[in-house]
Amino acid sequence: MSTEPSPAPETSVPTCYRHPGRETYVRCTRCDRYICPDCMRDAAVGHQCVECVAEGNRGVRRAVPRTVVGGRAPSSAVPVVTYSLIGACIAVYLAELASWRVVWEFMMLGRAALPDGSVGGVAEGEWYRLFTTMFLHQRGGTFGITHILFNMWALWAVGPALEQALGRWRYLALYVLSGLGGSVLLYLVGAANSSAVGASGAIFGLFGAYFVIGRRFGGPVGPIVVLLVINLVITFSVPGISWQGHVGGLAVGAALAAAYAYAPAARRRLFHIGAPLLTLALLAALVVLRTAELSPSL
């Protein structure tokens, strides 16, 4: 009886699961499917297919870009807050040129008679003047248009760097509270009928913050010191300038910047939120005390 040898079993050649026409013997270390060179992605061990790599990336939490003080970095390099502040000041200045009432109704004023015969000011409950005055500038007089030109130049010169270093909301809080600090100091130590306009208090706050941030993180502080000294000399030597607004803004800006820059890493968020709120509460308390002091003379 003769026997014939059995035929050899057929074997299929493995191919890439994404490209069936390509022969390959490499498997994805995650899903064990065959992958060709075009579908291979390097992994810690072996190779993975594109689908497994994509699935793995979805579970990875991406690091949030941070500023030098630990805040969330702006989503773009465009200094949106700085440009918005400049635009607001210019818009208000144009409104001033259109009507003198804009100045009288929104400038910083302790308590005094207005041109229409009424009595107005912070002591009369018009607390908004503490804030709105930082967007007003002189229309004429000793300084004229140079008042707004210098303040806007200073804001353009130091604002973008601070906005990038602090993040937008910290920077905006510093600017506004510095301006309020200048208004409050004028209200506290100035005469009852003291008045002022200008973003200078907020600008001096930026000067102080720029110096503190530069010192903390090793940046150049020489130019800002020179600029600050020159402006302080002008402040105390030229009549008609509210030194209270400048000094108050400088003090608040430097103090807030120190809270931002020197906050311990473990409690950074607490310091960055608490410092502006505490500053605002302190300024509000001082305004209330001064208003109560002026009340008997109403």
Image (cartoon, rainbow, N blue to C red):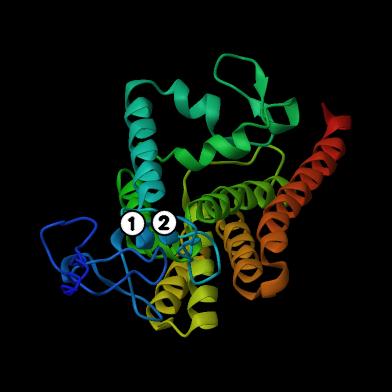
Q: Tell me the number on the disc at residue 190.
A: none
Residue found at the far right of this picture = 296
- Look at 63% across and 64% down and name the residue there: 251
Q: Give the residue displayed 18% in from the left and 67% down from the top.
A: 13
* Up-down relation of residue 277 to residue 33 (above or below): above
Q: Amino acid at mark 2?
A: Glu
Q: Secondary structure at mark 2?
A: helix
In terms of depth relative to the viewer, which is nearer, 202 or 275? 275
Q: How far from the left and from the top, in percent, is residue 295?
A: 85, 31
Q: Position of residue 206 (x, y in %)?
A: 49, 62
Residue 18, compared with residue 158, is above or below; it is above
Relative to 109, 30 lies left or right: left
Residue at 56 percent across and 14 percent down: it is 116
Quarter of the view holding residue 276: bottom right
- The residue at which mark 2 appears reads as 55
Residue sitting nearer the eye, 176 or 232: 176
Residue 217 shows up from this direction = yes
Q: Secondary structure at mark 1?
A: helix
Q: What residue is disc 1 on?
A: 51
Q: Position of residue 83 (x, y in %)?
A: 34, 46
- Looking at the image, which is closer to me, 279 or 237? 279
